[in-house]
Amino acid sequence: MKYTTMTATALALVLGTGAYAETLKWARSGDALTLDPHAQNEGVTVAVMHQMMEPLLIRDPSGELVPGLATEWSVSPENPDVWNFKLREGVKFHDGADFTAEDVVFSFERALSEQSDMKGIISSIASVEAVNDYEVNITTKGANPILPATLPNIFVIDKGWAEANDVVGVQDVEGGEETYASLNVNGTGPYKLVSRENDVKTVMTINEDYWGKDEFPMVYTDIEFTPIQNQATRMAALLSGEVDFIQDVPVQDLERIKSTDGMKVLTAPQNRVIFFGLNVADELVGGNVDGKNPLQDIRVREAMNIAVNREAIQQVVMRGQSQPAGVIMPPFVNGWTEALDQYPEYDIEKAKALMEEAGYGDGFSITLNCPNDRYVNDEAICQAAVGMMAQIGIDVNLEALPKAQHFPLVNGLSTDMYMLGWGIPSYDSEYIFNFLYHTKGDLYGAWNGTRYSNEKIDEMTQAIASEVDLEKRNAMIAEMWEIAKADTVYLPIHHQVLNWAMKDSVGAAMDSDDQVKVKYFTID
């Protein structure tokens, strides 16, 4: 992998001055939740970490799986349960320590530990063993044909650094714990941490000893990442030149940016779907119904599903910047079909009849928990849903909070109805069933806030992780989606459209996962 397409300006910066000369000022609506690489499986957190830490394999901006800290990988010809990874030699951590197989073994064991939020991604792994200093074998619980696709967000941490700083264990984010690893980084990545102030700014500088310095453009000396929750403030920062590049672009401002000299917008379909989850436990957490849960009745869930006017949300709230969805799976993912993605027709009268039939003709009250700094127009979508549910007698109390407070409510089973957005880094349905449909437990169902539990789904989720007959595996996935869609514990809203806005000079390498990797950027 060799990059030789740098612009004349970028070459001048590198060759003409003998050094890099640019700072990228990057902003989005929310901050990373932590710098501990195994503590939070959350998009912004992972994006920030990708600048400073590295996995064995990484996805480039086109979505292709390419070498990271591993240069080669293959299944053992003797045992299909064993994957062999050849590691990159000569790599150093930011503090100068050598990267070896010992660090890979330590990092995977840490990522699989009970406190880790990453353990569900790699739950098929039984053990990781160092063959020598630059080779590891990963043994899975039965053959796993998609193991490499699950690795791009499993970052490698230096074992010696972790031991010296008492961070062998993963940070308990939801318990409010702060550790050395939550505020400091010692990775192998292209940028090193300079300073970190939660919810204010994270500053990084180029790693002059980076192994890939001659393989990637690497045109930016420094990165300043600033969370700016307020949309108007974020826009003003871009248009005034205070920042160079923003994600989470307010859809109502797209045309304004496009018509502003010196600015541009990049747009692409995103590997993310937005949806509401419904609590199907025996009782509601809140609301005005005691001793039972209306959401357990499939007729109520179906009524809510057809009361969601997805096309109105698309046109009014999203200004056309979304694609209504009928399933909580983006089109990028193995298992997606046009038939599955068909969404029900908006029909208030039919929804009212279902509510009456279920015994809730007079409705009930419920709380909708929503983030206000994570997805595009997240709070506005929830506000629209409040009005739609009111049409069928459901009195919805909206509670919109920053994601740092919202996600613990979902994971702590403290919600009855909640918004979530889900991207699929493996590009495979197993990731969705693993995290969102499997019964919540130690290794599976980490983000299943619905309390949904289906023994067949659980068995098949674990089975597809080790099924090597791809035709049989895809048939199993199709059957699982039929069951999941019929059970309607999630209300799909839309596939999110990705918009990045920036100065004309920023040559952003856009990818569908919304995962910024500045080492690929150029200066135009």
Image (spheres, rainbow, N blue to C red):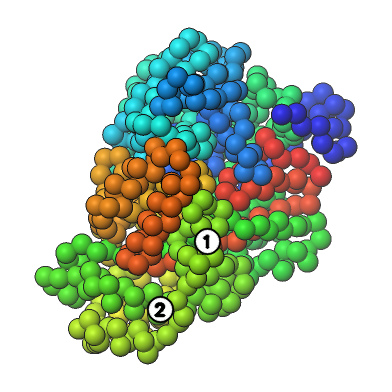
Q: Tell me, for residue 306, which label it has, or none.
A: 2
> Which of pointers 2 and 1 lies earlier in the amino acid sequence?
2
Disc 1 residue type? Thr
Q: Quadrant of the N terminus?
A: top right
Badge nearest the viewer, 2 or 1: 1
Q: Is residue 63 left or right of residue 46?
A: right
Quadrant of the image occupied by residue 119: top left
How many angstroms separate mark 2 from mark 1 (CA)? 20 Å
Classed neighbour count for the residue bearing mark 1: other residues with Cα under 10 Å, few (<14), some (14–19), many (≥20): some
Dividing the picture into quadrants, the one containing residue 214 is: top right
Q: Residue at x 42, y 22 (%)?
A: 79
Q: Residue at x 37, y 56 (%)?
A: 480
The residue labelled by disc 1 is 337
Given residues 178 and 252, the one toward you in this image is 252
Residue furthest to the bottom in view is: 349
Q: Do the CB atoms of the residues marked 2 and 1 lie less than 8 Å apart?
A: no
119 above or below 138?
below
Residue 469 location, x and y as percent? 45, 40
x%, y% of residue 361? Answer: 24, 87
Residue 412 at least partly seen? no
Q: Image point 85% across, 26% down: which residue?
A: 15
358 with respect to 391 (left or right)? left
Residue at image coords 17%, 75%: 289
